[in-house]
Image (cartoon, rainbow, N blue to C red):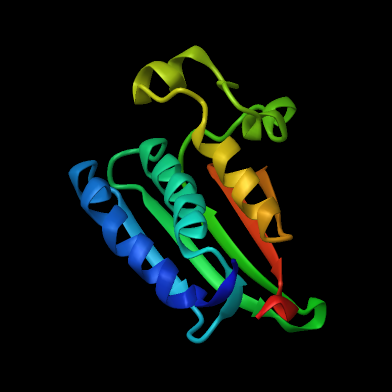
Amino acid sequence: AQVPLDLSALLDAVAHDARFEAEAREVVVDTSIEPGLGLRGHAELLRSVFDNVLRNAIRHSPATGIVALTAQRDGPRDQLVVSIADQGPGVPDAMLDAMFDAFVRVDAARSADTGGHGLGLAIARQGVKAHGGSIVARNRPAGGLEVEVRFSAGRT
């Protein structure tokens, strides 16, 4: 059953845990998380969602890069918005949707680097959908990839 959660605290914990991997790669995880963001959901599933997306961003960031995790309320749309942006190579535009499908690899070099199986972002999308949310990826004009997750704020 879904229960009331403190999304802000959950994101802080995910970022804290991911910093160990980031530090080993000389990547900085910069957070700007609005306090008190509430959501009804499954804590472990949401933790898995954000852990997968954040660690993916860390893996694809260059040494001394910054991964920015932001979370805030979008009042006009009555939504909670979580964004994870990296400074990596980005993704070909044609792959921005497909990268959330199971076993899809953006290119051989990215998969060879990480040893992953192409499941992390598929798991993330399923977890977001289970909470009535949306997940999209876009290339950033300054370089890198941004993954944005939106939930209805009314789900608290």
Query: Left of 19 or right of it: where is 49?
Result: right
Q: Residue at x 69, y 34 (%)?
A: 96
The vertical placement of 7 against 123, above or below, is: below
Between 8 and 32, which is closer to the camera in this rendering?
8
Classify the position of the N terminus by image quarter.
bottom right
Considering depth in this image, is 25 or 77 the residue closer to the camera?
77
Q: Quadrant of residue 128?
A: bottom right
Q: Residue furthest top?
A: 108
Residue at 57 percent across and 60 percent down: it is 83
Q: Is residue 154 visible?
A: yes
| For residue 22, above or below residue 47 | above
Count the numbered circles shown: 0
Q: Where residue 10 sits: x, y (%)? A: 42, 69
Identity of the residue furthest to the front in this view: 1
Q: Is residue 114 above or below residue 109?
A: below
Q: Is residue 141 visible?
A: no
Quadrant location, the C terminus: bottom right
